[in-house]
Amino acid sequence: MVASLQTDLNRTLRFHAGLIVLTNLRLLHLEEAVFHEWKLGDIHELVLEEMGPTVALHLQTGDSTAWHWRLTSRFLRDIEAFIVRFHELRGSNGNDDEAGDDEEEDLFAAEPASVPKLASKPLLRLLGFSRPWIGLMLCGLGLTVASTGAGLIGPWLTMSLVDDVLIPLQSATHEIDTARVYRFAGGLLGAAVLTWILKWATTYVVARLAERVTSQMRRATFEHLQKLSLGYFNKKRTGDLISRIGSDTDNISLFISINFIDFACDVLTIVFTAVVMFSINPVLALAALGPLPVVAWLVQWVRVRLRGGFAAASRAWSAMNSVLTDTIPGVRVVKAFAQEQREIERFRQQDQHIFDTNDRVNRTWSFFEPTIYFLTDIGLLVVWSVGAWCVAQEHTTVGVLTGFVLYVGKFYGRLDSMSRFVASAQRAASSAHRVFEILDVKPDMPVNKDTRQIGRLTGEIEFRDIKFRHGIRQIIRGFSLKIAPGEMIGLVGPSGAGKTTLINLVCRFFDVSEGAILVDGNDLREIDVMDYRRNLGLVLQEPYLFFGTIAENIAYGRPGATRAEIIAAARAARAHDFILKLADGYDSMVGERGQQLSGGERQRISIARALLVDPAILILDEATSSVDTETEREIQAALDHLVKGRTTIAIAHRLGTLRKANRLVVLENGVISETGTHDALMKHGGTYARLHAAMEEVNHA
């Protein structure tokens, strides 16, 4: 047994203990008295997917997922350590085990759409982002070859300098040719200057290429994120996504601009130096290259161990970022509940996790680098020993030996530099894999290529027996309703009935599992989603304001709106008066997430934002539930102006805010239980009457 991992959820997401065991030959799984096994050679990869409160571990064989396990997120570190041991074991075995003949029953044949395929060669995939700048790549390659060749001129001149100038000078058998000395010195200086110029040009060109490539990666990743549904973001931590777009792409940039160019120079220097050494003295060359096979074996040994270590370190940093993105914006709540020490402890735990993962990498690296230095010294010792014998036997000259030692120094110096490339390459590969994990996610709401532009809608909405399932939970069980243009519908019902889910479906944040939503007679899935959402106005319970000015936030849906249009929208939203009382008026900064404003002020800014886009369909989700009575009256007056002439779907727990609704729809357990006007539903004495009575009791209390 090499490693084990305890699981706490079964495939129906119910708590049940299970066990995964990794041996030197197999991966074993025991759950609910059922035993499964896979031979190590059959396993292509183990992929970790974070899904909010739970995590998934996917076992991939070839291009498909053969099995997956679900665990609660408290096992995240254990899974990371398990994957690291798997990579180490597979690397040490060479992944040469024979594939088993028996095929397991594929209980998880349907791979989740959000599970990315593992990029087996993530660094090679970077070439795809480099293709638009192929000319810059070829220029950098040419400069690299030229600068490497220029760097080998010095030792060659040194051989003649020693044999033809320095040794005769010491023996005093010849007169010194001063002009020749100057020529040697000038040649060495010229070689140094040429090398410096070429290296400077190489570094600049490659750094420019690196910035272009990583800039393209950042843009592509962010653009791809915008195409994914809310379901993807609900399963991801904000800090993790920020880390992937920010620090991971920065790691890739550093690798391309610094480490990769150094590696290319190292490879060329080693090849050119080996050719020169064999052309000078094959015996000395063979002696110098003696330790090379040992170095190659060490590089492979370290590469396998560093790959999993750097992947775990990247995830540890992401977890740290998640703690920061939770704690810093929520600092008021932290202080209000006196939980500073708790957050400090959370931070310490994540920091310890980073320390532990980096310490594991450092233990491997601390052994590897000194070993390379030791082998370098051994190589020089062998060259001096064999070279001294060759000079004594008059098989070579002192100048040739001196030049040879300089070449060996360059050879092993570059070999040492290449050894450091292993760590940087594994770190970059881990970062590239994390970025490609996002890019490989297929949107779970595929865009139909034949979608239509619809322009301005009249606002007719029809739900045709729609159903919606989230995971294993059926939320909407069969909902049918037709809303006329300009009609206001109030959605009421107990918490968890599916009201917000319906709103999300209307906005097409999710697609229905069954049935269809029609807008002006068009299936929502056949309409261009960007064109459709230009007809929507959304006012949420917790309005989100971006860092910037009040005017910029009001004009978010119409960035080209004039100041007069912005002011008109603010007046209609009953926001103009309080805005003028601020120091900078419409140019006042709202702060992070609008923290400089009160809840009611933020809500009125949100209403003004919806008014400015002049939507055909208006969505109100608990727009007045979290404000005081006086502020509610102000907001309600603004809403009365907003809903005129628009198809409106409103959710409210304060049932009085729905007094102007044409119809009230009562939703329970994902189906309509009642529908009608306020008076009709009160006479019916059903769920709505019960909710209204409970609200009246709360108001009187």
Image: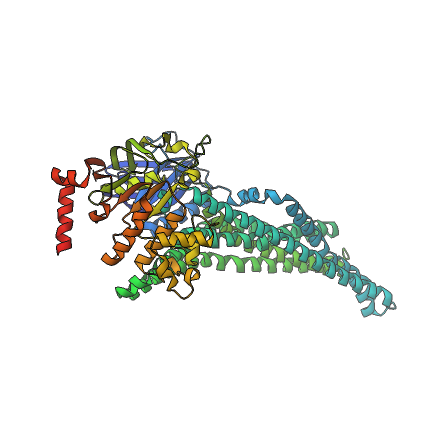
Q: Position of residue 26 (x, y in %)?
A: 37, 39
Q: Nearer the viewer, residue 398 or 427?
A: 427
Q: Position of residue 25 (x, y in %)?
A: 39, 40
Q: Position of residue 410 (x, y in %)?
A: 66, 57
Residue under the point 58% across and 57% down: 375
Q: Nearer the viewer, residue 485 or 337?
A: 485
Tell me where residue 603 sits by quadrant: bottom left
Where 667 sits versus 366, above or below? above
Where 87 sits versus 102, above or below? below
Q: Nearer the viewer, residue 10 or 487?
A: 487
Q: Is residue 44 visible?
A: no
The count of marks equals 0
Quadrant that contains the N terminus = top left
Q: Position of residue 578 (x, y in %)?
A: 35, 61
| Horizontal arrangement in the rendering, residue 294 relative to residue 452 (left or right) | right
Q: Nearer the viewer, residue 579 or 239?
A: 579
Residue under the point 25% across and 64% down: 337
Where 292 sits versus 93, above or below? below
Quadrant that contains the C terminus = bottom left
Q: Is residue 635 visible?
A: yes
